[in-house]
Image: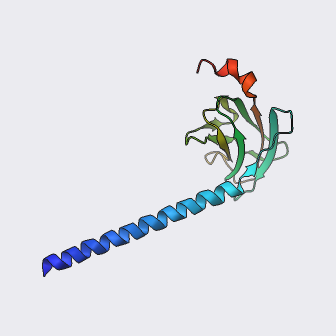
């Protein structure tokens, strides 16, 4: 009798674990899709290599996401600067790459180098939570991406 109840308990536990794992994976997938669809696209005017975006994080916001497309072995520089007229600066930038890696830092040039993959790049701009007073945090981000022919000499030894 004990062996039957034990098998039933183990079977029920496996079913519950499987259901919880499935629900978690569905939730994560939905959140990723929602996050990407709400990203602000960064557009480059025809014939230009750079684009500047400005923004403000409200006191209850900690981050904003942008997206742009680029090719592997294009040389890129991403710079964050303060936005005039705002009491705080959102100075944290992290570049999420199509290959799953990420790179970034606080303030100034947050990325400089050859892009590792072709596809959609996501840029997270955030406030430094250790140095915030909870006020509006502004930022100005310049994204410069050289065309492949101009990137060749910069990326050839990497």
Residue at 64%, 40% in the rendered image: 95
Is residue 157 found left or right of 5 in the rendered image?
right
- The front one of 126 and 124 is 124
Task: Give the image location of residue 121, x and y in percent.
Answer: 66, 42
User: In the figure, residue 38 lies in which quadrant?
Assistant: bottom right
Q: Is residue 93 visible?
A: no
Quadrant into which the C terminus falls: top right
Task: Give the image location of residue 83, x and y in percent.
Answer: 81, 42
- The front one of 157 and 101 is 157
Task: Give the image location of residue 5, x and y in percent.
Answer: 19, 79
Is residue 12 found left or right of 135 in the rendered image?
left
Residue at 71%, 41% in the rendered image: 69
Q: Can residue 147 be seen in this view?
A: yes
Task: Give the image location of residue 109, x and y in percent.
Answer: 70, 31
Q: Which residue lies most toward the bottom here?
A: 1
When the figure is inspected, residue 154 is found, relative to residue 67, above or below; the finding is: above
Residue at 65%, 42% in the rendered image: 119
- The front one of 136 and 66 is 66
When the figure is inspected, residue 144 is found, relative to residue 89, above or below; the finding is: above
Quadrant into which the N terminus falls: bottom left
When the figure is inspected, residue 120 is found, relative to residue 9, above or below; the finding is: above
Is residue 140 found left or right of 121 in the rendered image?
right
User: In the figure, residue 61 lies in which quadrant?
Assistant: bottom right
Residue at 78%, 51% in the rendered image: 56
Count of marks placed on residues: 0
């Amino acid at each position: 009798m004990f062996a039957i109840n034990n098998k039933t308990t183990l079977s029920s536990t496996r079913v519950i674990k499987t259901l919880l794992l499935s629900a978690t994976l569905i939730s994560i997938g939905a959140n990723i899709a929602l996050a990407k669809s709400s990203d602000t696209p960064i557009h480059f005017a025809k014939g230009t290599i750079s684009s500047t975006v400005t923004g403000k994080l409200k006191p209850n916001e900690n981050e904003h996401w942008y997206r742009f497309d680029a090719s592997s072995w294009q040389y890129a520089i991403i710079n964050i600067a303060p936005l005039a007229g705002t009491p705080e600066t959102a100075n944290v930038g992290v570049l999420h790459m199509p290959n799953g890696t990420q790179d970034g830092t606080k303030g100034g040039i947050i990325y400089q180098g050859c892009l590792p993959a072709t596809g959609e790049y996501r840029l997270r701009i955030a406030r430094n939570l250790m140095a915030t007073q909870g006020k509006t945090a502004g930022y100005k981000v310049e994204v410069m991406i050289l065309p492949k022919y101009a990137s060749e000499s910069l990326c050839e030894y990497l």
